[in-house]
Image: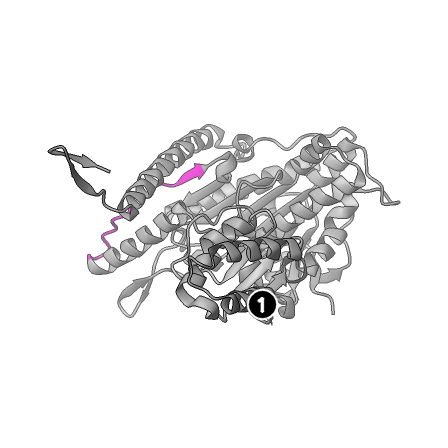
Amino acid sequence: MAEIKIISYDNANSDTARVSIVDTIPADETCVFYLGGSGIDDTDKAAKLATIVSREILSSITNIPNYAVAYDKGVITAGNGRVNKTAMERQIQFDRYGQNILKAPEEQQNIYITPDNAERVFRQSIYPLIKKNGRLITDKLCLIADGNREQIHQVLDSKLDKTAAKLNLTDADISIIKRVLRNRTVAYSTHFKPKYIEDLFERVLLPRITDINGNKLPTDVAQRRIRKLNILAHCHGAYVATMLAEKMQHKMQELGYTKQDIDAIQSQLLVVALAPACPLGKTKTQFISFTSAYDDRVLRPKNWVSQYVQENRVCDIDSVNQSKNNSVWNLKTGFLDGKNGDVFYVKQRFVLDDIDGEKKISWNEHNSAHYESKNFTDDGRLLADISRNIIVSGIKNSLSQGTDFIPLPPIDELILDGKNDSELSAVFKKLKQNGHEFLKTVCEYAKEKLKKMMPEPTMVRHRDTTERL
């Protein structure tokens, strides 16, 4: 059974639109391709996403092909022994890109490990578990090995031998722990590189960077073909887009493209992601994201920004319910650029639901993929408008491609709509300013948290003088 299906949605008449399943997307076709969340597990759900794109984005544009992907239920929801599929795949992706810098509130049980990071993983994750549980360690531990497993375990064995005395462990204890660690190691390449990523890549992206004989293309031809593909993503779909970008980079290296060629080609792939469950600012693609601080369902990296957002969201909802809609968190809509993710953020996309007299975060806050809604907040409407403008601008650039390659415009041009350009440019300038202020606020928050985590300085008496150590 195929792990994914690609559906084609006929935009010609949205009221009687026809949906068909296709094998591939033509290599030189201008199109929109939607990578939905993990809940898009049948063709009817994929068709609903394509309908939204058709009615709320493409209604004013020349009819272009409109595709969406449907995942097979088995590859999305099935567990594999000790691990759960998609949530763990996304969490491991944060680990791989070095974005999980804080320890989870609960002990980390699923640990990403490579030959290069094995010493650090032992020190930060495995040693504390052994110190707490001894040779029992934990029956929930899973080491996810990316690379040579024997090299990894050689490092772990060496560290165990060196710390045995400090941990008060006998030779028998050490032997048991080494066996447990080996038995509880699974291969990243086997369990956390979904086969449907390879399938999608071969059916959608590979034809745009190779000729009919499977050889690399002239750079400008590959740029033009990639530029004609406009990817929309939601939640898990953003993870998929990131994995596709990885696969694309590795394949182009195999094909003989230079690093400069690879960067130049990947920069022409536009990905517009809503509620992205993936590392941001880590690919060479033009990956532009939109997210809400009130979204309490999306998986985020374990870092200071996520912790700051979560604490303030909880306090804000509590205040709204206790003080008659009195919000205490004044988070200004903003934009974080470059390595910070090229992400537009708002505090809240949708108005709160009123359930039995209590305000609750709306189901739509994470799940709605609409660009039009009467339940948008003003900030949510702004987010949708900017997102739509970027998608439309990207499509228009795709349609302008002819014999000569025309590069994708920068973000400050993509946001324009040709009618309110001066106003939109001023808004974007303010959003960037708000983003800088937000990062300063988070930095101060992190400093205060770290200060409280530090032990109190010891006071000693020396020559009738009190000194701080």
Q: How many numbered markers are drawn?
A: 1
Residue placed furthest toward the right: 213
Q: Is residue 360 left or right of residue 144?
A: left
> Image quadrant for the C terminus?
top left
Q: Residue at x 32, y 53 (%)?
A: 311
Q: Quadrant of residue 175?
A: bottom right
Magenta stretch holds residue 407: no
Residue 274 showing in the rendered view: no
Residue located farthest toward the left when viewing the structure as drawn: 464
Residue 399 is situated, as x and y percent measured from the top left of the image, at 70, 37
Q: What's the magenta region?
A: 323-335
Residue in front for this viewpoint, 387 or 222: 222
**Alpha-carbon neighbours of circle 1 within 10 Å: few (<14), some, or many (≥20)?**
few
Residue at the spot x=78%, y=34% of the render?
A: 221
Q: Quadrant of the N terminus?
A: bottom right
User: Which residue is nearer to you in this view: 164 or 191?
Assistant: 164
Element class at badge 1:
helix
Main SS category, magenta section: loop
Q: Is residue 442 above or below residue 143?
A: above
Q: Nearer the viewer, residue 240 or 450?
A: 450
Q: Quadrant of residue 283?
A: top right
The answer to whether residue 91 is visible is: yes
**Residue 33 drawn at (x, y percent):** 66, 51
Residue at 79%, 37% (x, y): give it.
256
Q: Amino acid at mark 1?
A: Arg
Q: Residue at x 77, y 32 (%)?
A: 219
145 sits to left or right of 25: left
Question: Quarter of the image holding residue 9?
Answer: bottom right
Q: Which residue is mark 1?
A: 179
